[in-house]
Image (tube, rainbow, N blue to C red):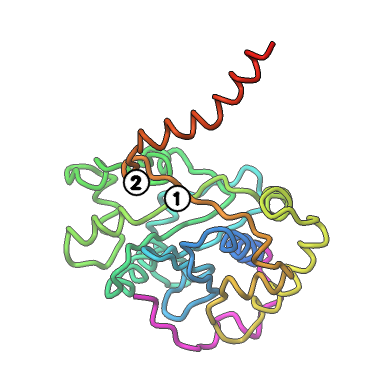
Amino acid sequence: MSIEFEQSHKRSHGRRTGDRYEEILLAYWCVRMILDRKILHVMHEVRDLEPADDIVVEFTTKIECYQAKHSTDQHGLISLEGLTTPASDGKPSLLHRLSEVWKELQSNDKSIEIHIYTNLAADPNLMKILDGNKIKAEVITQKRNDQHSRLMSSVNISSEDHKSDFFRSLRFNLRQPNVDQLINKIKKDWLNERLGLEPEEAYDRLMRHVGNWFREPKSRPIKREDVLGALQIDTTEIQQTFPVHWNEFIPWTSFQRKVIKILVLPLFQWVYRF
């Protein structure tokens, strides 16, 4: 089941001179969608999903919601205290607000991931509770733990099991590329190497359209066809991939023998001529 999408005014419309990091991240996911058939669409500022609405990516089986946080401070850190403490303007803590997004999406039959995507690194206290980009399982489950208590008390979810599910859905994408690095990643890794396009020209075409989508007053799904049109790509020119799931792969021995015979036998015949 897809997100029930409502054409709604973006919260930032009217002040959007452009959060550059957010805009480039939108472009990044748009380009990824071209080759990832599991992505249904990408959205920007979806109603009722603030603050994890900067970028929302809906896949066939899951929904990923991104809050993008960029800093020009090369030594800046994101802290556990900052995530769990209410803001000075009276707003609830970031984790509290993210948990509200998670609750909003629970009527959906897809798995939910809430991403904090930033070029910042974790401070020592946050680092202690992370295992890769997730909160350590023992921190979520061990109730006699100061870190556990701090996390659980920061969200407004009544059920302990649901609180645990929310914290399992969190992803901390830390030390991500800054603006310039992300632009270079789009040009080099995706437009040039994966799609075979001239990177500078293709990037300019892409960003003209992404900029328009980004500044649109209402949220709407951006689909694969939109991005293909922006880049002027003929779908017949895109390399197709057919992934093999080895746990489902059934070897066909007789077929393998026939292939080997076809490939190898002529070689032996040619060798024996000499």
The percent position of residue 43, horizontal first and vertical second, equals 53, 73
Magenta: main secondary structure equals loop
In this view, the residue in front, 14 or 150, is 14
The residue shown at (23%, 67%) is 157
Badge 1 marks a residue whose secondary structure is strand
Q: Is residue 198 left or right of residue 14?
A: right
Image-quadrant location for residue 86: bottom left
Mark 2 vs mark 1, CA separation in Å: 8 Å
- The residue pinned by badge 2 equals 135
Q: Is residue 250 left or right of residue 126?
A: left
Q: Are marks 2 and 1 in contact (CB under 8 Å)?
A: yes
- Mark earlier in primary sequence (2, 1): 2
Give the side of residue 76 with respect to residue 150, left or right.
right
Depicted 135 relative to depicted 87: above or below? above
Q: Is residue 141 magenta?
A: no
Above or below, 230 against 25 in this view is below
Quarter-of-image position of residue 10:
bottom right
For the point 71% across and 67% down, the residue is 233
Three-letter residue code for mark 1: Phe
Magenta part of the protein: which range? Answer: 1-20
Badge 2: residue crowd in 10 Å (few <14, some 14–19, many ≥20): many
Image coordinates of residue 106 in percent, x first then y, are 28, 71
Q: Is residue 140 above or below residue 57?
A: above
x 24%, y 55%: residue: 164
Q: Residues within 10 Å of mark 1 (few under 14, many from 20)?
A: some
* Residue found 73% across the figure and 53% down from its top: 196
Q: Position of residue 38 (x, y in %)?
A: 46, 62
The residue pinned by badge 1 equals: 172
